[in-house]
Image (tube, rainbow, N blue to C red):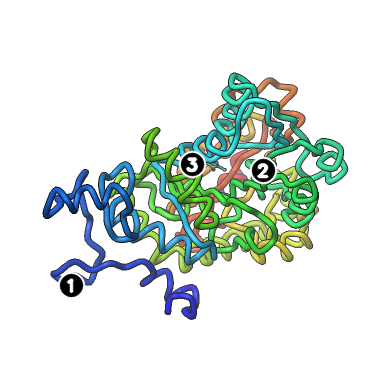
Amino acid sequence: MTKDWNTRTKLVHAGSRRSQYNEVSEAIFMTQGFVYETAEDAEARFINSGPDEFIYARYGNPTVAMFEERIAALEGTEDAFATASGMAAVSGALTSMLRAGDHVVAAKALFGSCLYVLEEILARFGVEVSFVDGTDLAQWKAAIREDTKLVFFESVANPTLEIVDIRAVSELAHAVGAQVVIDNVFATPVFSRAVEQGADVVIYSTTKHVDGQGRALGGVILGTQEFIRGTIEPYMKHTGGSMSPFNAWVMLKGMETIDLRVRAQAASALAIADSLQGHKKLLRAIYPGHSSHAQHDLVVEQMTKGGTVIALDIEGGQEGAFRFLNALEIVVISNNLGDAKSIATHPATTTHQRLSDEQKAELGITPGLIRMSVGIEDTDDLIQDVLNALSKV
Ligand SMILES: *Cc1c(COP(=O)(O)O)cnc(C)c1O
């Protein structure tokens, strides 16, 4: 039944489980454990529990299961495992899939904590990681070896909004039998077709567009049922990175409106980017969905729309960027993204502060670069706010 529904219907109904009270809004099963009628029932459940039989919240919980089923229906994967945060999903997926001696190829433009996991933690356990410029297929080709086990990248890089060609990189990886793991936050689950294009595993920080209102941390790993139940579930249930039932409920309610929100945010992002082209206080106004983006054709083919984030390179370096931030009246200064509220960040001094000047330059993180996550406020108000702040630079 769920399979035949269109996206908006799945987002409201997929995965719903009703208790004996037949509640309309999904219940929060705020329980760590479950009671068995008899000792024999307990024994049987530990041997083989069905999809709607639960043992312990670290293994699974009805509210968490509802969320997992709903987001898998959106992404088009057989299954999903919900985690305590986006980083629990990234680190859990990588550590459960890899072992000492394995070789990984990763794009170097990564969320800071993902870079830490790949560079520091995996190295400590004897996993070799080669980094490439994710937009350069020749570098992927040169780095992927016969013994490469896994490739990892963000399909839209943070904060420069460069696109990795999922289809082309997946072909190179699959030719040597490597698995393709994509951190797909910036593409958003609404515009993603990553699995269709070759991804084996898709990961989201649900802290971003899925919650969409800045309330709770969460993450999710999506893939085949065999992979999720055979590789991810045993790892997560024994290491403790599962999502809490309360956060799963927040995410479940976020799923109901994600399509409406993200499409409105993307339309505003395009309108803002369009109104800023050629502005005299800007060196660049980058938005993947705008025709001026260097990889616009790939964006259209790969994700249809450009997502909800724009990047602005402000004249006058850090001083110009700070003046711009401090003059904003609607857009708040913070570091989340995908939120209902528009948010601006100065990556060089915050999210990417840890990187050396050389690394920042290599990744295009200039002193004047601002990342702006476009919210659901009125588009004209947002354009006015940005233009007004630019006039103060
Ligand atoms: C936010 C983010 C993460 C980490 O997610 P948390 O929920 O904060 O742990 C990982 N990757 C990307 C691309 C992100 O934007």
Mark 1–mark 2 distance (CA, rounded to whole Å): 43 Å
Query: Compared to 282, does 13 lie above or below?
Result: below
Q: Is residue 51 left or right of residue 268?
A: left
Dot 1 and dot 2 residues touching (CB under 8 Å): no
- Decide: few, some or many residues near mark 3? Use Cα within 10 Å; few <14, some 14-19, many ≥20: many
Q: Is residue 53 left or right of residue 341?
A: left
Q: Is residue 88 left or right of residue 284?
A: left
Q: Give the amino acid type for the residue marked by disc 2 in the picture.
A: Phe
- Mark 2 lies on a secondary structure that is strand
Query: For residue 148, which quarter of the picture?
Result: top right
Query: Compared to 17, does 352 lie above or below?
Result: above
* Percent of width and height locating residue 281: 70, 43
The answer to whether residue 387 is seen in the rendering is no
* Percent of width and height locating residue 200: 63, 53
Query: Observer-nearest residue: 328 or 77?
Result: 77
Mark 1–mark 3 distance (CA, rounded to whole Å): 32 Å
* Percent of width and height locating residue 390: 61, 45
- Mark 3 lies on a secondary structure that is helix
> In the picture, which quadrant includes the N terminus?
bottom left
Q: Which residue is mark 2?
A: 153
Q: Closer to the N terminus: mark 1 or mark 2?
A: 1
Q: Closer to the N terminus: mark 3 or mark 2?
A: 3
Query: Observer-nearest residue: 256 or 353?
Result: 256
Q: Which residue is mark 3?
A: 89
Task: Look at 52% across and 35% down and name the residue there.
Answer: 91
Q: Give the amino acid type for the residue marked by disc 3 in the picture.
A: Ala
Q: Closer to the N terminus: mark 1 or mark 3?
A: 1
Cβ of disc 3 within 8 Å of ligand 1? yes
- Decide: few, some or many residues near mark 2? Use Cα within 10 Å; few <14, some 14-19, many ≥20: many
Identify the mark at residue 22; answer none if there is no mark: 1
